[in-house]
Image (cartoon, helix red, strand yellow):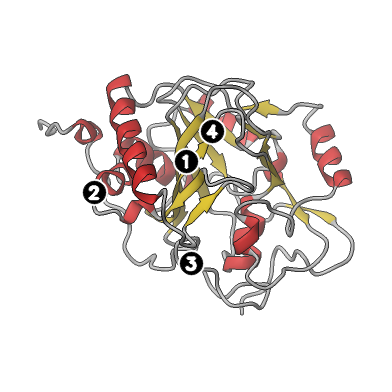
């Protein structure tokens, strides 16, 4: 077992520690300009508006609806339903569908940005479709993804980035992602312990590994009282750092919110044994086949065109 740089769920009291890893792991060469890199470094996230066209969003939405329909009647661990209803909340491991979403995960518009931020080739650590239906989409409490990936999956370093492709306009009122700017610079060591097979309940409502009120208040004060909302038009893409504190409110509006979600991890950031000492979570949550880096495909391949050299 490697030295635990970020212990969590090992005490009855929470604590806050400084981040030990770089935020941007490259020399800056890539599709993001210097201002965008500085914004990501400072805030822990970056919204690229309309990175995909309306035509491409239409294709993605059609494929999403097909996937949701195909999985509606399934009762498997990788299909998550809303608490209290049969509405699908998430469908995992979509990058292994041998079709549309596998190609989307390789699209150079997102892969090249991930490689630039992480300073290496990347692979998909996790992928899913998220859907928050109108009127009844539930909230998801504040958390750092890295805290879970570290404790429950054995991810050693903060060298991963989440990529959320927005398929429906994200308004302030339909449960968009909320983020605390600058929170990625600090690590909240959460109180408590990890229940056995925690993923079976945490994907609907996370409780283990959630920060305490005092830590959240401290992070928000460090951010100057700011809490940002990831609003924007369909086709936009939100990139956020693995340790950025985020959550979302329930969707009380008539307007559903859906997105395609890929987690890019550096091929140099191998996943080991969970730091909780428990058995690894299922493959659909933590892909351990990280020997094959993604080979990016041309941007225009999404709409069935061939790139002309």
Q: 282 above or below 279? A: above
Q: Is residue 54 left or right of residue 272?
A: left
Residue identified by numbered label 4: 133
Q: Residue at x 81, y 27 (%)?
A: 225
Label 2–label 3 contact, CB within 8 A? no
Question: Judging from the image, what secondary structure is the residue with disc 4 in?
Answer: loop
Q: 129 above or below 153? A: above
Label 4: how many residues lie within 10 Å, few (<14), some (14-19) or many (20+)?
many
Residue identified by numbered label 1: 163
- The percent position of residue 26, horizontal first and vertical second, equals 47, 46
Q: Residue at x 86, y 44 (%)?
A: 213
The alpha-carbon separation of the residues under discs 2 and 4 comes to 25 Å
Query: In the rendered structure, which disc, 2 or 1, sits on the residue that comes first in sequence?
Result: 2
Label 2–label 4 contact, CB within 8 A? no
Residue identified by numbered label 2: 99
The alpha-carbon separation of the residues under discs 2 and 1 comes to 19 Å
Residue identified by numbered label 3: 270
């Amino acid at each position: 077992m490697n030295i635990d740089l970020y212990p969590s769920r090992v005490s009855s009291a929470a604590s806050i520690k400084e981040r030990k890893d770089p935020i941007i792991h490259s020399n800056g060469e890539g599709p993001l300009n210097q201002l965008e890199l500085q914004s990501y470094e400072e805030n822990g996230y970056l919204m690229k508006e309309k990175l995909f066209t309306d035509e491409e969003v239409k294709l993605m939405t059609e494929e999403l609806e097909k996937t949701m329909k195909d999985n509606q009647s399934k009762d498997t661990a990788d299909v998550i339903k809303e608490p209290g209803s049969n509405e699908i909340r998430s469908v995992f491991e979509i990058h292994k569908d041998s079709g549309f979403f596998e190609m989307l995960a390789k699209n150079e518009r997102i892969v090249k940005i991930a490689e630039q931020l992480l300073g290496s080739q990347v692979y998909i650590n996790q992928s899913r479709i998220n859907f928050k239906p109108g009127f009844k989409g539930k909230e998801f409490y504040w958390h750092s993804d890295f805290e879970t990936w570290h404790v429950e999956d054995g991810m050693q370093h903060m060298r991963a980035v989440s990529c959320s492709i927005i398929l429906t306009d994200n308004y302030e009122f339909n449960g968009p992602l909320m983020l605390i700017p600058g929170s990625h610079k600090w690590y909240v060591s959460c109180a408590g312990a990890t229940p056995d097979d925690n993923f079976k309940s945490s994907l609907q409502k996370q409780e283990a590994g959630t920060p305490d009120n005092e830590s959240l208040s401290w992070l928000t004060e460090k951010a100057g009282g700011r809490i940002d909302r990831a609003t924007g038009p369909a086709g936009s893409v939100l990139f956020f750092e693995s340790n950025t504190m985020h959550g979302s409110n329930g969707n009380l509006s008539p307007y559903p919110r859906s997105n395609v979600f890929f987690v890019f991890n550096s091929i140099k950031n191998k996943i080991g044994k969970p730091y909780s000492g428990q058995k690894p979570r299922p493959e659909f949550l933590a892909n351990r086949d990280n020997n094959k880096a993604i080979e990016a495909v041309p941007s225009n391949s999404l709409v069935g065109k061939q790139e002309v050299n």
